Amino acid sequence: MSNLQATNQREEIINGSYDRPAGVSVIAVLLAISGGMLLIAQLAVFNRLNATSSDLSFPALLQGAIGFLSLLGVAGAVGMWLGKRWGWWLALFYFAYAITRNVNVLISIQGISEQFGVPASDQGVNYVKYGIRVLWNALFMVYLCGETAVTFFFGMKNVNKWKAVLLVFAVCIGIFLITTLVVA
């Protein structure tokens, strides 16, 4: 009897329990919804975006950035749902990109309001809105990098999370600098 019990325990340890943590499921669904809706919205207003962005002198860049972000969200959702390491990396990059983008907006609010003649006193709601977006995405990154079941689910126990975060932010800043040079 005890020999049978030991065999079952050994099989359970070998096969492991690969149940997806609830937080990973929530993040995967949110990424799929946001990426899918962004892709659908882009396709629905493709011509209007081209007309608007041509006035701004960078139509291909705008379409490319929106398409990249939507596909990144969908691919990250699939990878996270399946428990793949690349899903973890794509989700981490997605949230770092969102933080970088929203910090850029926070920095730009003052200049844009001056350019369009909007009183600076009316911009408080924008600072709060984009500040909350930065915090929201930062919380997702903290969850993904925490030493919880998430780390074990994706097999990321031996990955230095600080280096991973610095790497994705370096790539995001690089993208920001390249696109700034292309548009300028």
Image (cartoon, rainbow, N blue to C red):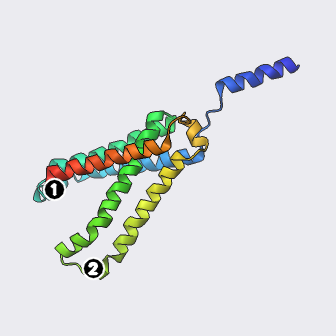
**Residue 28 left/right relative to 100:** right
Disc 1: CA contacts within 10 A as few (<14), some (14-19) or many (>=20): some
Quarter placement of the C terminus: bottom left
Q: Tell me what residue is drawn at x 82 percent, y 19 percent.
A: 4
Residue 137, numbered label: none
Q: Position of residue 95 (x, y in %)?
A: 41, 50
Figure check: 1 above or below 69: above
Q: Tell me what residue is drawn at x 76 percent, y 22 percent.
A: 8
Determine whether the residue tagged by mark 1 lies in a helix, strand or loop.
Answer: helix
Q: Position of residue 84 (x, y in %)?
A: 48, 33
Total numbered labels placed on residues in the image? 2
Residue 81 visible in the picture: yes
Residue 66 visible in the picture: no
Judged from this view, the residue extending furthest toward the top is 3
Q: Which residue is mark 1?
A: 53
N-terminal-most mark, 1 or 2: 1
Q: Which residue is mark 2?
A: 120
Query: What amino acid type is highlighted by mark number 1?
Result: Ser
**Residue 89 left/right relative to 122:** right
Q: Nearer the viewer, residue 48 or 28?
A: 28
Determine whether the residue tagged by mark 2 lies in a helix, strand or loop.
Answer: helix
Which callout, 1 or 2, points to the residue nearer the camera? Answer: 2
Figure check: 55 above or below 39: below
Q: Tell me what residue is drawn at x 40 percent, y 46 percent.
A: 166
Q: Position of residue 83 (x, y in %)?
A: 52, 35
Q: CA distance from mark 1 to mark 2?
A: 26 Å
Q: Position of residue 160 (x, y in %)?
A: 50, 39
Q: Tell me what residue is drawn at x 29 percent, y 52 percent.
A: 41
Figure check: 35 above or below 6: below
Quarter placement of the N terminus: top right
Figure check: 82 above or below 169: above
